[in-house]
Image: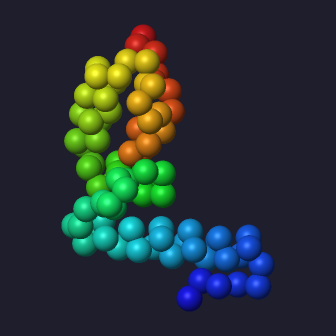
Amino acid sequence: MGYRKDLPSSVEVYDQLWADGLKAVVDAGGTISHHHGVGVLKAGFMKRQWGESFEWLCNIKKNLDPKNIMNPGKLGFPETWKEES
């Protein structure tokens, strides 16, 4: 379905299909999941799915992993923590 004559075009279509599908799932009230975890592909939709609760999840992760060494950038969490001012 997403096949194109060159790899960059195929990747672009593949990524857009996933983005459109994930948006539809979240908009319909569904949840983002995968048997290997949310990972990178679906991470961009975590904040949208969790809404205001996503900040709580970030705070929990930050308190459990202050040096952010456990899978930084996964699950939609930041690559680095913002310094407290």
Q: Is residue 85 above or below residue 38?
A: above
Q: In which quadrant of the rendered view does residue 68 lie?
A: top left
- Relative image position of residue 83 (x, y in whole percent): 46, 15
Outermost residue toward the right in this view: 6
Query: Would residue 59 be visible to someone looking at this image?
Result: no
| Left or right for 17, reference 65 | right
In the image, residue 11 sits, relative to residue 44, either above or below, namely below
Q: Residue at point 25% right, 43% down?
A: 52
Q: Report the residue at 74% width, 70% height from top.
A: 8
Residue at the farthest front position: 36
x and y, in percent, of residue 33 in the image: 30, 60
Q: Relative to residue 79, is residue 46 drawn left or right? A: left
**Quadrant location of the N terminus in the rendered image:** bottom right
Furthest-top residue in this view: 85
Q: Residue at x 65, y 85 (%)?
A: 3
Quadrant location, the C terminus: top left
Q: Relative to residue 72, is residue 29 drawn left or right?
A: left
Marker count (numbered)? 0
Residue 2 position, x and y percent, is 59, 83
Q: Residue at x 29, y 22 (%)?
A: 64
Q: How is the image coloured?
A: rainbow
Name the foreground residue: 51 vs 46. 46
Residue 43 or residue 29, whichever sits in front: 43
In the rendered image, which quarter is residue 32 located in? bottom left
Does residue 67 appear in this view?
yes
Q: Work out whether 44 lies above or below 72.
A: below
